[in-house]
Amino acid sequence: MEQAEIQEKIFAYMQQMKGKKKLKEKDIIKKIMADTEQDKDTVKTALREMINVGKVMYSYGGGSSSVEIPSEEYLKEKGLL
């Protein structure tokens, strides 16, 4: 499976969970590993690439970090929409 396909699955899962639950990095990795049968390092690398380009981002609140999809304004500003 290509990195782009894994990233699409990550993004789709994050959109599905948006507003329902704050997702931790490990939650995303476990879910995508189960869905795609990819190893942890492959999924983690795909997620990190998405973070590096700004398609998703870390947020901090309540003493813990989570990964979320940035607002549409942020994505437009970065040229990702």
Image: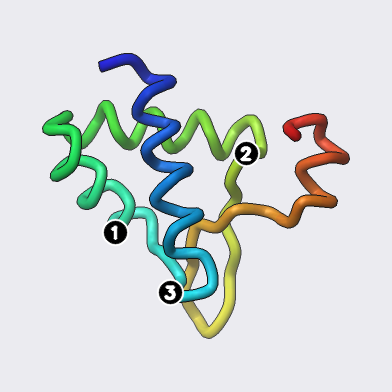
Rendering coords of residue 26 (x, y %): 29, 55
Query: Residue placed at 58% from the left, 78% from the top?
Result: 61
Query: Which residue is situated farthest in the top direction here?
Result: 2
Cα separation, mark 3 vs mark 2, equals 18 Å
Q: Amino acid at mark 1?
A: Asp
* For the residues bearing labels 3 and 2, Cβ distance under 8 angstroms: no
Tell me if mark 2 has few (under 14), some (14-19) or many (20+) residues whose alpha carbon lies within 10 angstroms of its own. many
- In the image, residue 27 sits, relative to residue 41, either above or below, namely below
Q: Of label 3 and label 1, which has the lower sequence position?
A: 3
Q: Of label 1 and label 2, which has the lower sequence position?
A: 1
Q: Nearer the viewer, residue 79 or 43?
A: 79
Tag 1 residue: 27
Q: Is residue 51 left or right of residue 76?
A: left
Cα separation, mark 3 vs mark 1, equals 11 Å
Q: Is residue 6 left or right of residue 63?
A: left
Tag 3 residue: 21
Which numbered tag is attached to residue 55?
2
Q: Of label 3 and label 2, which has the lower sequence position?
A: 3
Q: Amino acid at mark 2?
A: Lys
* Quadrant of the rendered image containing residue 46: top left
